[in-house]
Amino acid sequence: MHKLIFTIRENVRIARGSYRMLLSSPVELSLLPGQFVDIALDGLFLRRPISVCDASSGNGTTDITLVYKKVGEGTARMAAMHEGETLELLAPLGNGFDTGACRGRALLVGGGVGCAPLYYLCRQLLSEGKSVCAVFGFNTADEALLTDEFSRLGVEPLVATLDGSMGTKGFVTDVLGKFAPEYDYFYCCGPLPMMKALCPVTVSDGEFSLEERMGCGAGFCYGCSCHTASGTKRICKDGPVFKKEDIIW
Amino acid sequence: MVKDLSVHLCGLKLPNPVIPASGTFGFGLELADSMDLDTLGGICLKGTTATERFGNPTPRIAECREGMINSVGLQNPGIDALVADRVPRLRKVFHNTVIANISGFSIDEYSRCCRMAGECEGIDIVEVNISCPNVHNGGMAFGTDPDSAAKVAAAARKACPSKPVFIKLSPNVTDIVAIARACEDAGADGLTLVNTFLGMRIDIRRRRPVIAAGMGGFSGRAIFPIALRMVYQVRKACRIPIMGCGGVASAEDVVEMMMAGADAVQVGAENIRNPMACPEIVSALPELMETLGISRLEDIVGIIE
């Protein structure tokens, strides 16, 4: 874990309530799909953990893309920031997705802003020569995000919206029932009720990215502990990604 | 001019007075890869009980203005794992003062844990927590009454004859001086002042407390003036050393705490928002001392009349 200053290169609204922030730092830092950063914001005591949507590093610099939803005071402050301003980040944090667990064909299931970490994961899986099927759920079409970005990677997401304004009306589980995509491993990030509903209908092993109100974000305050099938774990440090068989819903 | 940052606690020499407070730095090992732990004067380990505990349900963290509430509830692997695993592992990467923090739900439990901590080679000081607001029938219940506090202090002193025993007091009392005196009279070698303040936040949209347990311990910069006042009052009333704790977030705060009467200073919630807080404070101290005309940090302990 490092404490680094990043400069905001772009901060734009990409869907109703959601924003994309591009950050760069003159330090080379390796980030893995599924890891997150913890952002210090002026006037707020605790940092805000945000998962990494995309990252690249080389030639002494690191670029990070964050896609976040404005849900509270912290993300509202982030949304009000401008290009050229700086943020202090702790990074990298947490354990990412295990891309090696997928043998050939991955299913990615994202709900709302939970689609964000799946983008970097998708890029990684494709670079490892695996094929990817993506299923996304949103409340409404105007909340849909990253669908074009996935398309540009050659992965056309199957979308469910609650109101039917885009794709299949209903939940991601409805999409899975309707299209029955083939996969040998799945990766999921989204709201807890969605992940809970998805788990029993999956036909392979897989993993989920969990969230919890965090204190330190780096595993030493024990604020975000949870029970798993393999004992007590800290979501920030031992997760946020956990194997399907470890999660006690 | 070279600045002397070293301080003494019950005959132990610390290279500087900055110590991460119990519960805000895990067992030290969690941060070993992120910093040089030996920049710290000491490390106070996470509160440990006789048996393993998961602690309270989540969410157990709530943000506040200039602070936070935690209701972790003493999650820990138990005293056996502490002395057999955590401390020996920490000792491979940390060479300054190690302080074990012991909690319990009965006098017997406190005694057993203090004895084991006292017999553990890698532990230098045993800090007895009679002030945890996050567990029922224990913790703070012992720390809010002078007689109960004295009983724990006497039992801990007896169980751990070979190492300094500090009692960590709760600020959630009417008269902290009475509790401090009771602990000193019962044989405590030192005092840690103070633990967190019982606090609460409500999610007004969901109409329920933010943290699952309802209430928790409030800490952070906001409590600094109250903690400082308590350190000052107890310094005037007691002779045993004090580790000052509560809202310390800068080198200036460390100096202020020491002027009020602290022999060493613990940094708590600030670590949660900035894991590098302690090494940053240590490195800021020499320049601040230069500005203030201090050559030996220990000289300022308790200088406020």
Image (tube, coloured by chain):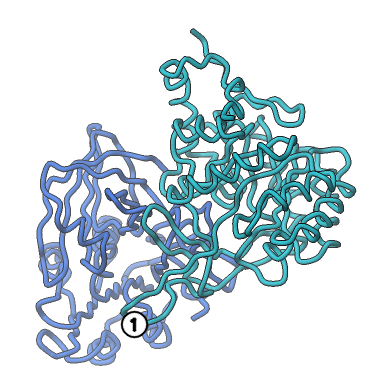
Chain colours: A blue, B cyan
For this rendering, which residue is in front, A181 or A108?
A: A108
Q: Quadrant of residue A203?
A: bottom left
For this rendering, which residue is in front, B226 or B7?
A: B226
* Residue located at (45% from left, 46% from top): B270
Residue B304 position within the rendered picture, expressed as x and y whole percent measured from the top left: 56, 29
According to the picture, the residue beneath numbered tag 1 turns out to be A194
Q: Quadrant of residue B89?
A: top right
* Residue located at (64% from left, 25% from top): B7
Residue B299 position within the rendered picture, expressed as x and y whole percent measured from the top left: 60, 20
Q: Residue furthest front?
A: B305
Position of residue B135 in the picture relative to residue B207 (left or right): right
Residue A75 position within the rendered picture, expressed as x and y whole percent measured from the top left: 24, 61
* Residue located at (22% from left, 32% from top): A59
Callout 1 secondary element = helix
Position of residue B288 in the picture relative to residue B300 (left or right): left
Quarter holding the N terminus of chain A? top left
- Amino acid found under the numbered disc labelled 1: Met
Residue B190 position within the rendered picture, expressed as x and y whole percent measured from the top left: 74, 40
Disc 1: which chain?
Answer: A
